[in-house]
Image (cartoon, rainbow, N blue to C red):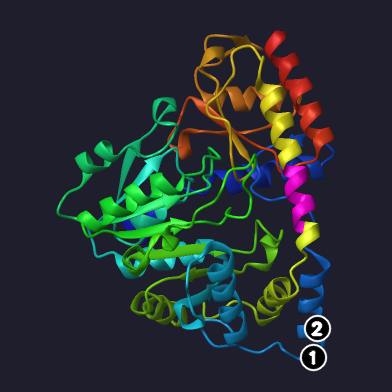
Amino acid sequence: MISRRAAGLPLSSTATLDAHVKKLAAEGVDVINLTGGELDFPTPDVACRGGIDAITSGFTRYTAVSGIAPLRQAIAERLTEKWRCPYEGDDVVVTNGAKQALANAFAVLLDPGDEVILQAPHWVSFPHMISLAGGVPIVVETDAGTGFKFDRDAIVDRITVRTKALLINSPSNPTGVVYSRAELTALAELAAEYNLAIVSDEIYSDLVYGGVEFTSVASLGADTRSRTITVGGFSKTFAMTGWRVGFAAGPRPVIAAMSALQGHTTSAPSSISQRAALAALVDEPIQELADRKAELERRRRLTCDGLADLPGLRLAVEPEGAFFALVDVSGTYGRQHDGVEIKDAATFAERLLHEVQVAVMPGADFGVPDHIRISYAVGAAEITEAFRRIRAFLTT
C-alpha cells in the first residue's frame, strides 16, 4: 500500500532523538540535552505582541498563498539592506518554516533523476528532501583537510549531464563552518560554468561569531542571483521555531512555481505567525538580538574549551556560525562501558546518555559516522555540567 519512496523514508533522527530526550526529562530524568536545533531563548516580546494583535483584531483567516504582502516586502528589504541582495516583495514566498521552502524548491527544480550536489557533513534532511522530489543526492565528502568545505575539483568530478543544482549551507549544520566571499564566488562561477541552479540554505545567517563575516550567495551579482534560491526563516534568529515561518527568495518563475505548489499542498503559513514575523522585522529588537548573539558566542567558547583536552574526543573544526560543534569520537573506539564496546558514534552516544545522562546526536545521518554533533543552544551552566559528566564518562 505504501509507495517505495515513502517506505524507504526514515524518521528524522534529530527530531526523534530530541523528542526522546525531552520525554526522559518530563519523566524526571536529570538529562542534559545537547541534541537540539532550538535555542532556549524566548520569542521576543515584539513578535509575541504581533501574534496577539493578529488574534485580537480577527486576523485569523486564510492569507494569500505566498504570504501577506507586507511580510514579503519586509523580508525583501531585510535581504536587500542587510545582506546586499536586491530583492523585491514579488521575489519572495513565505513558507511553513524553512524546511518547506527547501522541499518546495527541490520539488519545482527537479525532474526524476536530476542530481543535486551537496557536501558531507550535511543536515540530516537534505538527501531525503532531494529524493522525495524525485532527484538524486550526490554527496561530496569533505574533511578537516578541506576545512569541511567543498573542494572545486571534487565537485567537478561528480558533475554529469543530469546535474541540476548545487546545494550550499552556510553557516553549516552540523559543522558551524562559514564560507567566505571568495569561496562562494568560486562556487558561483562553477555553477555558472555548468549552468547549475544554486539552493542556498542561510537559516543561520545572523549567527556568526569571532569577527567572521557572513556572505549571502545572492549578493555576488545579478547572474548568480538569477540562478539562486535563497532560503531563510525566523526560527533561529528570532527563536520562533514553533511559529513555523520561513521563506525563499529567488527568480520570479521559480518563486511563482513554489507558490503554486504551496497552493495545492499546505497553502499559506498561519496568518497569526505571519503577523508575528512581520512585527519582528518592522520593530526588530536589535539590542536583544545582539545580547543573545553575545551569549551564544560565550557558549561557543565554553564548548570549544570544554572539548580541548577530553581524552578520545577531537573537535573537527572550530565553529564560526550556527550553534553546533562537530566532534570526532573515533579515539574512544574499543573502550568498554558496562560490557558494551564503543565501535561507532551511535554506540558512544547511547552509552553517554545511559551512563551520565548527556544526550548528543550521532553523526551517521549527517554523513559522518565517526562524529557526534553537540548543540550549544542550552545555558552556560548546562554546558559546563555536561562537560563535567562527559569527562567522568571518558575517565572511568
| Residue type at numbered disc 1 | Ser
Q: Which of the image's four quarters has the C terminus?
A: top right
Residue 320 sits in quarter: top right
Judge whether residue 127 can be spotted in this image.
no
Q: Residues within 10 Å of mark 2 (few under 14, many from 20)?
A: some
Of residues 203 and 104, the one nearer the viewer is: 203
Q: Which residue is mark 2?
A: 53
In this image, 314 relative to 299: left or right? Answer: left
Total marks placed: 2
Q: Which residues are magenta?
A: 289-296
Above-or-below relation of 49 to 165: below
Residue 57: which numbered mark, if any?
1
Which residue is painted at 60% across and 9% down in the image? Answer: 336
**Callout 1–callout 2 Cβ contact below 8 Å:** yes
Above-or-below relation of 67 to 162: below
Above-or-below relation of 22 to 90: above
Give SS at disc 2.
Answer: helix
Give SS at disc 1.
Answer: loop
Of residues 155 and 284, the one nearer the viewer is: 284
Dominant secondary structure of the magenta stretch? helix
